[in-house]
Every structure is written in structure tokens, then in C-alpha cells.
Amino acid sequence: MKVLYKNQLIDREQAQVIDIEDRGYQFGDGVYEVIRVYNGHTFTLKEHLTRLFESAKKIKLTIPYKKKEITALVFQLIQANQLTEGTVYLQITRGNQSPRQHDFHLSQQSESILTGSTNPKAVNRAQLQQGVKATLIPDTRWLHCDIKSLNLLVNLLANAQAHEQGATEGIFHRDEIVTEGSHSNVFIVKNKQVITHPANHLILNGITRQVILAQCAATGIQLEEREFTRKELLEADEVFFTSTSTEGQGITEIDGQIIGDGQVGPLTKQIQQLVFQEINKQCGK
Ligand code: PMP
């Protein structure tokens, strides 16, 4: 198994090179992306790299490579690990700035550290047909959720809480407003209209979300980006999560309350199909 370290592929066993003073390790001072691979091809890599550079810019982190170079490195990594189905994880931290100090301006020495790895875990499409349970959790994250930051503690705690309660994932809400999932975006369907939270500082603008917005626009499915309440969520005809790891997943129960008729709904299924079509278009054999 090869991993990416800076701009080189090295053996996983040799990747003991992360410095104890790395700011990613000390502060979560960095950003990341997870990209899907189908049939050995990346899906929406360009969009993921655009978001990686945007996230980095928002935290004033300089990525010392061009998108073109990172693209080539990702392709090399996929090839070296013979990855056909799975994900590529990319992260970039602000590097080592010893001794540990908060202000990253204090030393010019630090070099951003790009790392990457692969995971041969395919999407569980059978599970996508079944639908999952979710639980509502107060969104106590910061106000920069548009940045794909390494700081995921609130998300991790929400996910753990969801699992403890027998649910697959948490759905965050700020007072009455539903924002997103603990590692996904949330959509509701009411009277054939699809609704999702606007892409602002309160959510991550998911790449899967962006694919769905484009697909709905192209196929005439009515979609509105607007805030919706917990009440609207629980009274929706259909609810679904979207993310790179799960594509689109119907939610059939929230905190013991059945959503719609308790089955993955027709518009959810239609949107899942539109996502599959786009995957086949970009990554077909
Ligand atoms: N919101 C959050 C908080 C997430 O962690 C994720 C997945 N990383 C998403 C949304 C979905 O984003 P994407 O479709 O790009 O995977």
C-alpha cells in the first residue's frame, strides 16, 4: 500500500514521518477532501480540488502545489494501489512550526504538508435501497462550516450519539433550523418539491449536493435552497442524506418518528438514479 507524502508516493510502513510538532496534529490546523473512485476513475475530482483550495484560502493556508500536480499525484496513488472502487483521502496541514505556538505568522519556516491515502471501501448500494434512521442533534459547531476543516469533534460526537441511539447519523439543527447531517447534507421533499439548506457558512457545500442541484435543474425537478425547520423535516414526505461516501441515502425514521410512509420515497429514488447516471457518465468502464 502506497500513501502520498508531500509530492511523493511512499510505502505506508515508511510513513512515520509526520512531525510531532505538525499543526494538523496539534491544532487540527488543516483541511481535507474525500474523493470517490469508481471503475478506477475519480468522480468530481475537479470540484473536490476547487473546494480544497477554497478551504485552504479561507484558513490562510498556502498549498505549495498546483491543482494539476495534485491531480497527477491522485492518479498515481490510485494506480499504485490498484484502486478500482473506494475513496481517496487528501489532507493538507500547516506543517511543523516548533515550538508549538498559536500564531502561524510567527515562523516562516513551516511548510504545508500534503498527505493522501486510499480506502478500498465501495458504496453499499443495497443499503441505499433500505433507508436509515437518524436523530436530531443541536448544531454546536463554529460558524465556518463551509470550510472542510480537520476539526471534526462536534461531528464525531454527533455521530457517536447517533450510533448510541441506534441511528445511522445525526441531523444538526440550530434552534428550529435544520442545517445538515453530521457528515452529509440533508434534503427534504414536500409536495414534490425538494428543499435543502442554502450553501452558506452554516453548512458544507457538498459536492454530491452540487451534483444533485445540477441534475435537478437539468431534469426539471423543483428544488429550492432555503432554510427549513425541524417541524418541516419531521412532516416531510421524504428525507435523504447526500455525501461522497454514501451518494444519497433515504431517511425513513427520525427520533422514532416515521417519515412519510416509512419507505425510501420516489423522488429520493429518482435522485439516487440521477447521481448513478452522472457517476456512470464520468466513471463508466
Ligand atoms: N456536510 C458535512 C458536514 C460533511 O462532512 C460532508 C461529507 N464530508 C458533507 C456535508 C457532504 O459533502 P460531499 O458531498 O462533498 O461528500
Image: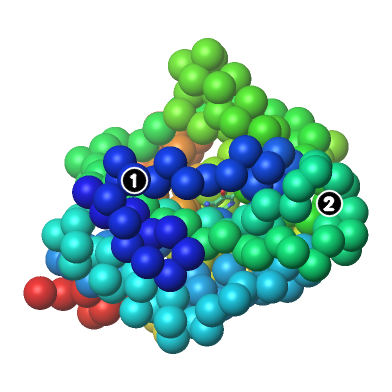
Disc 1 marks which residue? 14
Residue ID at (74%, 42%): 27
Q: Residue furthest top?
A: 164
Q: Nearer the viewer, residue 228 or 59?
A: 59
Task: Relative to 112, say whether 186 is above or below.
Answer: above
Residue type at mark 2: give it: Leu
Q: Dot 2: few (<14), some (14–19), or many (≥20) neighbours within 10 Å?
A: few
State which tag comes first along the sequence, 2 or 1.
1
What is the x, y in percent for residue 106?
89, 59
What mark, if any, has residue 143 been given in the picture? 2
What is the x, y in percent for residue 47?
49, 76
Q: Nearer the viewer, residue 1 or 40?
A: 1
Label 2 CB less than 8 angstroms from ligand 1:
no
Tell whether 128 sits left or right of 214: left
Task: Relative to 55, say whether 83 is above or below.
Answer: above
Residue ID at (57%, 60%): 113
Q: Secondary structure at mark 2?
A: loop
Q: Secondary structure at mark 1?
A: helix
Number of callouts in the render?
2
What is the x, y in percent for residue 187?
55, 53
- Camera sees residue 239: yes
Residue ID at (83%, 51%): 143
Residue ID at (71%, 39%): 26
Residue type at mark 1: give it: Gln
